[in-house]
Image (tube, rainbow, N blue to C red):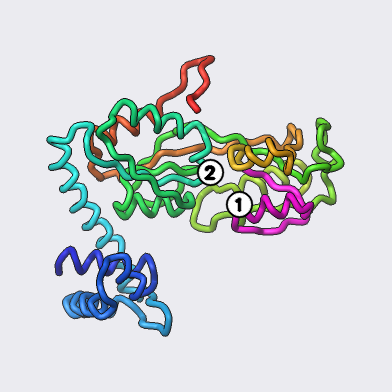
Amino acid sequence: MDFDELRTFVTVAALGNFTQAGHRLHRSQPAISRRLSLLEQELGVPLFERLRERARLTEAGRAFLPHAEAALASLDDARQAVRGLQAGLQGAISLALVGTLADSHIVGLLRRFTQRAPGMRLQLRTASSAEVSDLVGRGEATLGLRYFTGNRPGLVSFEAGAEAMLVIAAAGHRLAGHRIRQARALAGERWIGFPPAQAERDSSGHVLRRLLIKAGLDDADFTVIDSLTAQKRLVQAGFGLALVPETSVRDELHQGTLVALDVPTLRAAIPITAVHRSKGYLSPAALALLALLTEKPKPGKKPPS
C-alpha cells in the first residue's frame, strides 16, 4: 500500500467516478482501476461497487475512507512542516470558504494579510459550508471559513464574526418601506429557503424554520430551494420571500431589483466559523492568517471591507 493508491482511492470516493478521478489526478482510467485493484487485493475486500456510471463505496470502503484521508493529510502536514521551517511567511496557504463570504468583511482581512506577507500565495476555493469542512478534513485546504460550526469529527472551530440575515422581497412588495412590527402581517406569504442540513447541527434552513415558528408562522407555505441564486431569482419574480445573508444581496438591493423588509421579529445573524484539523500542521503563515480571521474587532471600530 502506498500513498499514490490512497490518493487514488480518496479521489474516486469524493468524485464517485473513475474517469473524473483520472482527469483530476492526470492519469488514465485504466491506471486508476489498476491502482484501486491493487489496494483492494492488499486489503482483501472490495472498496467500491462498480456501477454503470458511478463508483459507490462499499461498507468496507466507508470504514477505510477516514483513515485514508487522515494518512494523506498527515503526509501533507509533514511536507508543510519541513517547508515551514525555512519559509516563514513565504509559500502558500489553501483557504476554503463559502462563496458569499467573498463579499463580506473577510475580503478586507485577506487583503491585509497579503499586504503583511507579500511572499505568501493565498489559494482560495469556494464551496458550501459542509464542503468546506470536508475539504479541510481531507487536507485539501489548510483553513476553512464557513457558516456555523458543523459536526465533522477531527476539526477545531473558532469564531470569526457573524453575518446579518435579511428578509428579502420583490421590488414593489406591498410592505416594502414599512416597519412590520407583527410578523403575522406576512401570513399567507410563501417562503423560499434551504432545507435544514441533515448532517449538520445547525444551518440556514434550521434558522428560518425556527424563526417562523417563533413568530407564529409555522403554517407558512414553504418551498425548499437548494440554491441561493435560484432563491434570489424566484424572489425577484414575486414567487415568495426569503431569508438570506446580507452580503449575498448587496448588489440586488443597490440596483433595486430586491428590497429588504423591516421585520424585527425575524432578525437574525448566523455565525462565521474558521476551522482547521485538530491534529493538522499549521505553518507560521497559516497561524498568522487564523489569528487575523478570528481577531475580535475593537469596540467602535468597523471591520475592514
Q: Residue at x 71, y 58 (%)?
A: 223
* Residue 100 disc label: 2
Q: Quadrant of residue 266?
A: top right
Is 165 on the left-hand or right-hand side of 7? Answer: right
Looking at the picture, which amino acid does disc 2 mark?
Thr
The residue labelled by disc 1 is: 228
Expressed as whole percent of the image width and height from the top left, the position of residue 171 reads 79, 43
Q: Callout 1 environment at 10 Å: few (<14), some (14 to 19), or many (20+)?
A: some
Expressed as whole percent of the image width and height from the top left, the position of residue 183 reads 80, 39
Residues 14 and 229: in front is 229
Residues 176 and 215: in front is 176
Q: Is residue 203 above or below residue 116?
A: below
Looking at the picture, which amino acid does disc 1 mark?
Leu
Q: Residue at x 31, y 26 (%)?
A: 116
Q: CA distance from mark 1 to mark 2?
A: 9 Å
Magenta range: 220-244
Kindly check if marks 1 and 2 are in contact, taking CB atoms under 8 A apart as contact: yes
Q: Is residue 56 above or below residue 242?
A: below
Residues 219 and 79: in front is 79
Q: Secondary structure at mark 2?
A: helix
